[in-house]
Amino acid sequence: MRFVRFHTGNNVPTYGWIYGEQVGLIDGTPFGEYRRMEAGIDLASIQLLAPTEPSKIICVGRNYVDHAKEHGVDVPEVPMLFLKPPSALLATRLPIMLPPQSSQVEHEAELAVVIGRRGRWIAPNDAKDYIFGYTIANDVTARDLQRRDGQWTRGKGFDTFCPVGPWIETEMDPYDQLITCRVNQDVRQMASTRDMVFSVQQLIAFASSVMTLEPGDLILTGTPAGVGPLTPGDIVQVSIEGIGELTNPVVEEP
Ligand code: MG
């Protein structure tokens, strides 16, 4: 099933489910008990929100060999974790804002795991029980600031630097799906998730050995090779087989 979040007429954020080209309201939350209401809202007529409200956005650096190579670094021996703040979340179709502090902002197309159950010290074999579904993310990065600072909080943490969506897909096999990033229709990144260094299960096990995972939390699983610059006026489209497409224009921060 596909779940979305959007504003209802009285401006209250709510979850919905997709049936064909229509959306129905969810009474409750998809992470707990809920009831699906009849689907009668035209999907094309609503501005979606980021499809989850994570307590944290856990990211993984250098999880594809070819991406590590293009930056001249080795693949890490254990997953390299960092966090993006929830304030960086951005819905599909809304603009990524290039901050004045950076002159090198880049896209990073990534598969994102949405956690469904609270857990700590999750064994790799149990990890699937903690997955609610999958969505698409763009780990937007101010590469110059990431390099200059030595650690990544500023370069990865600006508002709008975490586009996520358009929805959560609950029925998907994440192990061999094509990830593509296009900028103004030019293909910049294209790879299969089978080229990940650490699998989704290994990442869940590793992250949960550090911090408690909560329902709605996101794990961004790393980007393949081909990251490149974003400039004002660009349109970035990240698509993942089996999920859909996340599209964002790029503007200068006003
Ligand atoms: Mg990344």
Image (spheres, grey):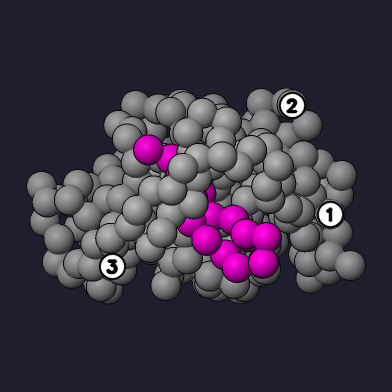
Q: CA distance from mark 1 to mark 2?
A: 17 Å
Kindly indicate the quadrant of the structure image that contains residue 229: top right
Secondary structure at badge 3 equals: loop
Dot placed on the residue nearer the N-terminal end, 2 or 3? 2
Q: CA distance from mark 3 to mark 1?
A: 33 Å
Q: Position of residue 20 (x, y in %)?
A: 51, 28
Dot placed on the residue nearer the N-terminal end, 1 or 2? 2
Question: What's the magenta bit mostly, secondary-structure-wise?
Answer: strand
Say if 63 sits above or below 103 in the image: above
The tag on residue 185 is: 2
Q: Is label 1 in contact with label 2 (beta carbons under 8 Å)?
A: no
Q: Position of residue 18 (x, y in %)?
A: 48, 39
Residue type, numbered disc 3? Leu
Secondary structure at badge 1 equals: strand
The residue that label 3 is drawn on is: 213
The tag on residue 251 is: 1
Kindly indicate the quadrant of the structure image that contains residue 33: bottom left
Which quadrant holds the C terminus?
A: bottom right
Q: Position of residue 166 (x, y in %)?
A: 56, 44
